[in-house]
């Protein structure tokens, strides 16, 4: 086809810039692994050999098993907690990166769509109705509430062109509605204890992490991460708005729908598991953009890893800083994240 | 590629923006779209690019109605440069141009050597090679416009739709760009405000007025004092400049 030979490029003088990306991926994964291992040890009265024995016994290695209590402390409490921190951190950061692109709003975070407000309403309802005794009760209620909020969001958006401003405004409206419902229920029927418990939950805490949450989060994250990553070039295309994206070959409506569903489910599962941990989804993608630039092929996976590392360490800090009192991890993500982020901004000369 | 527009109408609720437009652009032709603000040039270009759901009528590429085409297929046939497409994203110039390769590679694959070579060639064409590593935020308006054009060229489409591409460009780059638009084997439709530039580089002009085509044909036939008075509400005189190019002079508007 003669028409296609518009540019007749000379192949090829441009070196493919791939080395930096590979190096960063390997490096960040290594950092994540080391963080996971170290974090298991932090704030637990067990030595390395003891942790090794606990893991070894589970993996069927010929080691002397630990006493039940210590073993349970490591295997049933600490290990799932560290892993859940990593999974939730990764999920929130990926959601933030995707939503910042499809809404073209650098303030977008996973809670923008009102999903987390729905989760709190669900959790509050469960607590007030008295099912709070079982941990699964709160988690299940939060998940139901989150999916309810998401359902309402999609219902309100169903006949629109899904343009950026409308997504943001509808998300805010849904969030406000569920926030108001939460307050209403709390004030009308909550006692002081449940209010306190819920406030802690709303700020996010990993103390209740169990293996079930880890498995659910891992599966959802794996699928979600793959979906978002496959949308990388579409997310890049959104940089110049919907029309340009469409002219580049991005199916704007389908992509937005797929990404809204994916990020909402990711957020719902993360919030249901640990509460609304703030800041990670907003700041981590920005920080990673400073490192590797705005292209999502790298931004998305690296955000996942950095988000994971960030939350693993923040949670480790919450365990030891005010021990034996545990501060909600959501408080620390901001306390730790703000100075880190300002440092990055400063290095880039944007502040 | 031949672009055919048949009885095209498009509007927003309560208002028709483009009404019953018929147009035929032959392969390799460069057609200039002129008309006052709000005459429907940009909307027509968006419809021709397949970015709007038409109220009535059809847009055809080589005779095939594009209404049900997937975005990827459309993007391999037609590139489109918006009038104002800006971003907060900190993309580099070469990354912006690489966006043009989106529809040419599977979603799981990053750019390969061919993509990079095509991007390099497009940058070269628009005189942007030296700016390849520059951040979008550091570019001037004209450089951004050229980057968008390079991106559209990198798309390697048989068709090209340009909305006011000479905005913000200095004279030299205006001339180079229009020469490129006129010379390329692509079928080009370009919306322009500069009537003399349109007359000089386009094979044919289409004059839009209130959402319809008011006149169509060679520059000499479209750029006439009565037509310009009717459509633009100006008192114009058409002549030749000292180099022999068609020139348009305007008298003071009478209030």
Image (cartoon, coloured by chain):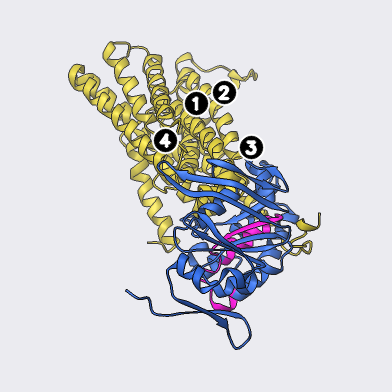
Chain colours: A yellow, B blue
- Cα separation, mark 2 vs mark 1, equals 9 Å
Viewer-proximal residue among B235 and A271: B235
Residue B68 numbered mark, or none: 3
Which residue is depicted at the point 44% across and 34% down? A42
Based on the picture, tell me whether residue A296 belongs to the magenta stretch.
no
Image quarter of the N terminus of chain B: bottom right
Which residue is depicted at the point 61% across and 49% down? A248
Viewer-proximal residue among A80 and A213: A213
- Above or below, A302 relative to A208: below
Residue A79 numbered mark, or none: 1
Q: What's drawn in magenta, residue-wise?
A: B146-174
Subunit that carries the residue with mark 2: A
Q: Which mark sits nearer the N-terminus, 4 or 2?
A: 2
Classify mark 4: helix, strand or loop: helix
Q: Which residue is mark 2?
A: A55
Based on the picture, tell me whether residue B157 belongs to the magenta stretch.
yes
Q: Which residue is mark 4?
A: A316
CB within 8 Å, label 3 to label 2: no
| Nearer mark to the viewer, of 4 and 2 | 4
Percent coordinates x, y for residue A215 in the rendering: 53, 22
- Cα separation, mark 3 vs mark 1, equals 52 Å
Image quarter of the C terminus of chain B: bottom left
- Cα separation, mark 3 vs mark 2, equals 57 Å
Percent coordinates x, y for residue B141 in the rendering: 49, 68
- Cα separation, mark 4 vs mark 2, equals 20 Å
Q: Which mark sits nearer the N-terminus, 2 or 1?
A: 2
- Above or below, B158 relative to B220: above
Subunit that carries the residue with mark 3: B
């Amino acid at each position: 086809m003669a028409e296609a030979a518009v540019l007749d490029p000379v192949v090829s003088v441009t070196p493919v810039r791939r080395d930096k990306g590979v190096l960063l991926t390997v490096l960040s994964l290594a950092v994540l692994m080391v963080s996971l291992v170290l974090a298991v040890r932090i704030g637990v009265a067990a030595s390395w050999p003891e942790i090794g024995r606990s893991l070894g016994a589970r993996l069927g290695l010929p080691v002397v098993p630990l006493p039940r209590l210590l073993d349970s402390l490591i295997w049933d409490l600490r290990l799932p907690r560290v892993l859940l921190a990593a999974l939730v951190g990764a999920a929130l950061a990926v959601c933030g990166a995707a939503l910042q692109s499809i809404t073209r709003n650098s303030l977008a975070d996973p809670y923008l769509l009102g999903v987390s407000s729905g989760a709190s309403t669900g959790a509050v309802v469960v607590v007030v109705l008295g099912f709070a005794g079982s941990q699964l009760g709160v988690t299940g209620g939060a998940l139901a509430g989150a999916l309810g909020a998401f359902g309402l969001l999609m219902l309100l958006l169903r006949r629109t062109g899904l343009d950026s401003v409308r997504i943001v405004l509808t998300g805010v409206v849904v969030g406000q509605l569920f926030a108001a419902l939460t307050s209403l229920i709390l004030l009308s029927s909550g006692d002081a204890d449940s209010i306190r418990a819920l406030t802690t939950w709303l700020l996010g805490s990993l103390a209740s992490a169990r293996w079930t949450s880890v498995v659910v989060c891992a599966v959802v994250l794996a699928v979600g991460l793959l979906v978002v990553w496959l949308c990388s070039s579409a997310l890049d295309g959104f940089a110049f708005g919907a029309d340009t994206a469409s002219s580049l070959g991005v199916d704007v409506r389908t992509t937005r729908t797929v990404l809204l569903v994916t990020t909402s489910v990711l957020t719902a599962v993360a919030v249901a598991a640990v509460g609304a941990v703030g800041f990670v989804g907003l700041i981590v993608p920005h920080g990673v953009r400073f490192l590797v630039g705005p292209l999502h092929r790298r931004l998305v996976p690296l955000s996942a890893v950095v988000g994971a590392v960030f939350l693993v360490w923040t949670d480790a800090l919450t365990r030891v800083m005010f021990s034996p009192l545990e501060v909600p991890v959501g408080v620390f993500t901001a306390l730790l994240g703000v100075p880190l982020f300002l440092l990055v901004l400063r290095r880039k000369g944007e502040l | 590629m031949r672009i055919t527009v048949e009885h095209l109408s498009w509007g927003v609720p309560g208002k028709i923006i483009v009404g019953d437009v018929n147009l035929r652009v032959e392969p390799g032709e460069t057609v200039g779209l002129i008309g006052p603000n709000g005459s429907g040039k940009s909307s027509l270009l968006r419809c021709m690019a397949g970015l709007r759901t038409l109220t009535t009528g059809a847009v055809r590429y080589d005779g095939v109605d594009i209404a049900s085409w997937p975005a990827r297929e459309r993007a391999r046939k037609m590139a489109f440069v918006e009038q104002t497409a800006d971003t907060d994203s900190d993309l580099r110039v070469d990354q912006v141009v690489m966006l043009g390769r989106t529809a040419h590679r599977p979603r799981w694959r990053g750019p390969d050597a061919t993509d990079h070579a095509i991007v390099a060639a497009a940058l070269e064409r628009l005189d942007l090679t030296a700016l390849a590593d520059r951040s979008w935020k550091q570019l001037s308006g004209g450089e951004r416009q050229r980057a968008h054009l390079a991106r559209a060229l990198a798309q390697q489409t048989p068709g090209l739709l340009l909305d006011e591409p000479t905005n913000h460009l200095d004279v030299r780059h205006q001339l180079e760009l229009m020469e490129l638009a006129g010379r390329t084997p692509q079928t080009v439709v370009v919306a322009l405000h500069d009537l003399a530039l349109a007359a000089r580089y386009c094979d044919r002009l289409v004059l839009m007025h209130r959402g319809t085509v008011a006149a169509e044909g060679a520059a000499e036939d479209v750029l006439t004092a009565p037509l310009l008075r009717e459509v633009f509400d100006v008192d114009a005189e058409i002549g030749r400049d000292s180099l022999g190019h068609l020139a348009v002079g305007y008298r003071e508007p009478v209030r």
